[in-house]
Each structure stands twice: as C-alpha cells, then as structure tokens.
Image (spheres, rainbow, N blue to C red):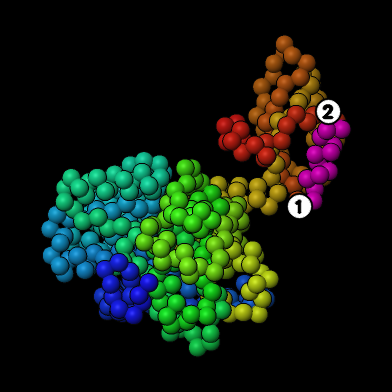
Amino acid sequence: MNMKNRTVDFPSLYGVEEARKTLENVIHTTPLQKSFRLSKQSGADIFLKREDMQPVRSYKIRGAYNKIYNLYKEDKTGNGIVCASAGNHAQGVAFACRKLKINGTIFMPVTTPKQKLEQVAMFGEKYVEIKLIGDTFDDSKNAAIQYSKSYGAEFIHPFDDVEIIEGQATLAMEILEQTEDPIDFVFVPLGGGGLAAGIITVFSVLSPKTKIIVVEPKGAASMKASLEAGVNTELLHIDKFVDGAAVQKVGDLTFEICKDHIHECLAVDEGKVCETLLEVYNKDAMVLEPAGALTIAALDLYKQQIAGKNIVCIVSGSNNDITRTEEIKERAMLYKGLKHYFIVKFPQRPGALKEFVLHVLGTSDDITFFEYTKRNSRETASAIVGIEVPSFSDFEGLLRRMKEAGYYESYLNDSPNMMNILI
C-alpha cells in the first residue's frame, strides 16, 4: 500500500490533509480526555477520543462530508446522492446534504432505533428522504445500490471508499497532535472497517510502533472471521444489537488495508457492551451508543497487555435511544450472571408458589418474571420464572434448592433461541 502519494486505489496522507482542509469549518476537533477511573481500573493511562461530541454525535460526519463535498466540487451531485446506513453515516450524509443543498435519499434498516431516524430527518430537513428497507444494513445497502443504478444518484458508501476513509483518518491526525507521549495501543471500533483503515493510513506512517487493536461485537465479528479465513468473508447471520457496528461483511478495500496492519482483532460480547454502557453512564455521566462503548468494553479483555502503557480508545458515537434502556439492562444482567430464567414445575394445588418462595428462593433473590396458567387436568404445570440474584455466586445455591425441592424442569439461559420465543 502506497501511503506517500495519493493513488486511485488506496487512501494517502495527502488525501487526509486535503480532507482536513475540507472539514476545517464543519467538524469539531474533539477532546482527547484522560479517564482517571479507567486508568486506575486497568493499570494503564487511558485516553478517550470523544467523537460522541461531534455535531452529529459520531465520527461518521468526517468521511461523509469529505466524500460528498468532493463530488459537489466535481459537479457530480446533479442527480442527488444516495446512501445506506444503520444510523450514524446517515446523519453525516444528511448534515452534508443540508449544508451543500444537495438532495439525498437515505436507505436504513427497518430495525433502526427511532432516535436515529429522527436525527437524520432533523439534520437533513427538506433535502433528504428516508426509506426503510430490510432488517440489516446489508439489506439497505443492496437497495441503495439498485436505486443509484436506476436514478443516477451518486452512491455514498459508509466505509469502503477512499475519500470516506481519508475523512475518517483526520481523527488519527488529531490524536497525534493532541498528545506528546508515544501511544502504545489504539483501540478502534470496527463495523465495515472505514475508521480502522483511516487510523492505519495515518499511524502506519507517522506512528508505526503503535499497535492497532480493532474491536467488534461478538455477534457480528466479520473482520475476525475474514482474518481467520484469509479472505473477506460474509457472515450468514449476525446479532444486530450493536447496530453501529453490525455488518455481515467488511469492505473489500478496508479489508485489504487492515489485514496486514491490525495487531489483534477482539470480539466483545454484547452483554459486556451493555454492562459498559451502564457503567460509563452511572460513573462518568457519558451517554454512549453500543458501538461507542466497544473499545472501553474491550479493555478488560486486554488488561495484562496494556498494563503501564499509553492507550487511546476511540469513543465513536452517542446516538442511543432511551427506549432501549430496558433491553440494555437485561443483556447486562444476563451477561453478569445476575438474572436467570427457568421452566419450573408447580404442583396444581394451593400454596405451591408460597412453598417455592420460602424454600427455594434465597433471602435476597427476586422474582422478576412469572408466567403460569393453572390446568386442573394435570398434577403439575409448568411456569416460566425469571429470578434476579444478588451475585453470580448465589446461582448455584438457587439451582440446587430448586432441584432438591422437585421444581426444576429446565434452564433457559443456556437456550437463548427458546428464551426469545417464550419471554
């Protein structure tokens, strides 16, 4: 990869510098803040690059505006532009459309959180039209590409594009200017790979000793799968919870740039991401979206390697929907082993539930879910019961007492598909 001169195929430092000029009066130079809590917790110096403080509350504005402005200068936006996005790229595109007075059509998954839809409409005003297509980003992307072919609108890829990558890379330039000390590790959230490719474009030349750690959600670890296979690989099924980073396949260009420069690719459990979201909100007063918490969530997985080092975690966005709070809490508690779901056998007689409460539950255990229908034609009937325990160590005692008293039928936490159907 030629980093010294701009080429058609790969991003370059020249292109990054040009992108900085384009973005000069458009974006914020976001803070690089030391987190004393995370530093103490991990035994390292942890700095957070706060891209959640951009005008559209994510770094995506960098690449989107850079790409669209260059098309605008070349007089290629007469038929409008079109893009696909799970939310943050769409907001950057909408912002650019309004500022440059360009018509844009934005395809988004039907599952996109309402908050992100409202933000896109707000930033784009009369210049954008939103079309909800499919369940995943990839469904929306295919629809957007077809629209581009049919109407001649320029397709603005969210990550697999040289000028998009160069826009995202301006973030890396800022990081290097904001610290005098050498950076040992940069933790980068990864969905399609545009941000990681931008970080590599800059750091491989200006700070080659810095190790690049990319972080994906466990349920959509497409880069990890691709690195293990040696070729860019599409996942058949993904968990869409971390919507800002849940893609079935990373970009072909971004894979080529990343594959030889990533020090390690980490896959973080969605439950750990939820635990981190709640923690940074309660302890640091930071409201992040799931993708924005990926790098912080990964620190525990890498605690031994980063001890005593200078670490930068890119906090990529804060476009979270408050209506998701209950789901976030639920996933966090399941991950920490504090909430457990069972199918319980209850005798069909009065007082059975009272006996269960007195003889099976611990003094601090709490029933949080209960679904039961009495059937007089049977001696026992099954109920679905959710129980919250004070700590994970209390689970074994609960399970033992349930079995000894004859109430136990099955444990649903080990069968997530069944649990999703029943609860």
For the N terminus, give its image quadrant. bottom left
Q: Residue, x 39% and y 70% (percent of image)?
A: 198
Q: Is residue 259 rendered to the left or right of residue 61?
A: right
In the rendered image, residue 158, in percent from the top left (x then y), is placed at: 34, 58
Q: Is residue 77 left or right of residue 163?
A: left
For the residue pair 356 and 3, the one nearer the viewer reads as: 3
Describe the element under mark 2 as helix, strand or loop: loop
Residue at 33%, 42% (x, y): give it: 133
Using residue 93 as the reference point, say whether residue 380 is left or right of it. right
Residue under the image location 36 percent in, 77 percent down: 3
Q: Is residue 86 above or below residue 180?
A: above
Near-viewer residue (282 or 146): 146
> In this picture, is 307 found above or below 327?
below
Mark 1: amino acid: Ser
- Tell me which label, 2 or 1, sits earlier in the chain: 1
Q: Nearest the camera: 287 or 11?
A: 11
The residue that appears at 51% across and 53% down in the rendered structure is: 229
Q: Residues within 10 Å of mark 2 (few under 14, many from 20)?
A: few
Image: magenta residue range: 393-404
Q: Is residue 54 visible?
A: no
Question: Which x, y percent locates residue 246?
Answer: 46, 52
Number of the label disc, if any, that sits on residue 406: 2
* 396 falls in the magenta region: yes
Q: Which mark is residue 391?
A: 1
Where residue 382 appears, as percent x and y from the top left, is 71, 24
Magenta stretch, overall SS: helix
Mark 2 to mark 1: distance in Å?
Answer: 24 Å
